């Protein structure tokens, strides 16, 4: 499998087959792999049970669902989505993500989904918040409300991807604040890529402390 060029919509990102989706059915087999992951944090694991890290230190969120494995070829798509002004890819990610959620009939969906906020300055520079674009498309597929007024990013932190793993937690410490005293009991926090989970943990912790009972995390990809 190789990456040709992103000509979307119109043709597959990888092989240029004509399609109105971002990738064709053939390339989807390489893109969306069935990987066994911890149900709480979505780290790769050998069996579908709670991983050692989550057993040792229970995260402040309840579950994590991801669509893609953040390595070749998915990383190319996500980088285009984030950095090459391709917000329309959100439609394709959301459609497949919603299908995945719907296959889990035991799942109780939240009524509210909360995209990880970007700092206002960063959002102006990029022109869009990729997590919000993904959340909006998920709302459409799942009939849920996207709420952007519950929290905001008060500190314009360095991009996590630019930092070594061990300083990421410190980098996002205190980066968010809640803007509402009325917090839903059940939410899904929506992010683009989870690497160490520091950003999600920081935000989830605020909602947990404010009384949120069930916090699900939905991301396009995880490393
Ligand atoms: Zn293809
Ligand atoms: Zn885990």
Image (tube, rainbow, N blue to C red):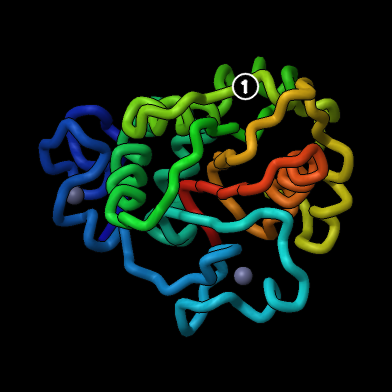
Q: Measured from the top left, where is residue 56 in percent x and y?
A: 76, 77
Badge 1: residue crowd in 10 Å (few <14, some 14–19, many ≥20): some
Residue 8 shows up from this direction: yes
Q: Is residue 133 above or below residue 205?
A: above
Q: Residue at x 35, y 25 (%)?
A: 140
**Quick check: can you spot residue 4?**
no
Locate residue 150, reporting x and y percent.
Answer: 69, 24
Which quadrant holds the N terminus?
bottom left
Q: Residue furthest bottom?
A: 46
Residue 145 falls left or right of residue 74: right
* Mark 1: secondary structure: loop
Quadrant of the drawing holding the C terminus = bottom right
Q: Is residue 93 left or right of residue 13?
A: right
In the image: residue 209, left or right of residue 126? right
Give the labeled residue for mark 1. 148
Which residue is at 33% across, 43% downward? 98
Could you say where residue 27 lies in the image, as x and y percent from the top left?
21, 55
Q: Nearer the viewer, residue 59 or 213?
A: 213
Q: Which quarter of the picture shows residue 206?
A: top right
Q: Quadrant of residue 87?
A: top left
Is 63 rendered above or below residue 173?
Answer: below
């Amino acid at each position: 499998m190789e990456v040709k060029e992103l000509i979307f919509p119109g043709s597959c990102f990888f092989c240029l087959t004509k399609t109105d989706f971002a990738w064709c059915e053939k390339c989807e087999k390489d893109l969306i792999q069935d990987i066994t992951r911890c149900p709480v944090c979505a780290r790769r694991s050998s069996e579908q049970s709670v991983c050692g890290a989550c057993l040792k230190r229970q995260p402040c969120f309840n579950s994590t669902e991801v669509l893609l494995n953040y390595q070749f070829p998915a990383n190319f798509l996500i980088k285009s989505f984030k950095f090459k002004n391709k917000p329309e890819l959100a439609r394709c990610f959301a459609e497949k993500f919603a299908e995945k959620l719907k296959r889990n009939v035991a799942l109780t969906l939240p009524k509210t989904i909360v995209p990880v906020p970007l700092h206002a300055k960063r959002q102006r520079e990029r022109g869009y918040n990729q997590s919000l674009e993904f959340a909006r498309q998920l709302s459409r597929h799942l009939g849920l409300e996207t709420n952007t007024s519950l929290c905001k990013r008060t500190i314009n932190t360095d991009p996590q991807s630019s930092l070594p793993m061990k300083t990421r937690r410190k980098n996002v410490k205190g980066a968010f604040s809640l803007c509402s005293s009325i917090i839903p009991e059940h939410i899904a926090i929506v992010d683009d890529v989870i690497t160490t989970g520091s950003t999600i943990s920081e935000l989830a912790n605020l909602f947990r402390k404010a009384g949120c009972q069930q916090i699900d995390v939905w991301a396009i990809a995880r490393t």
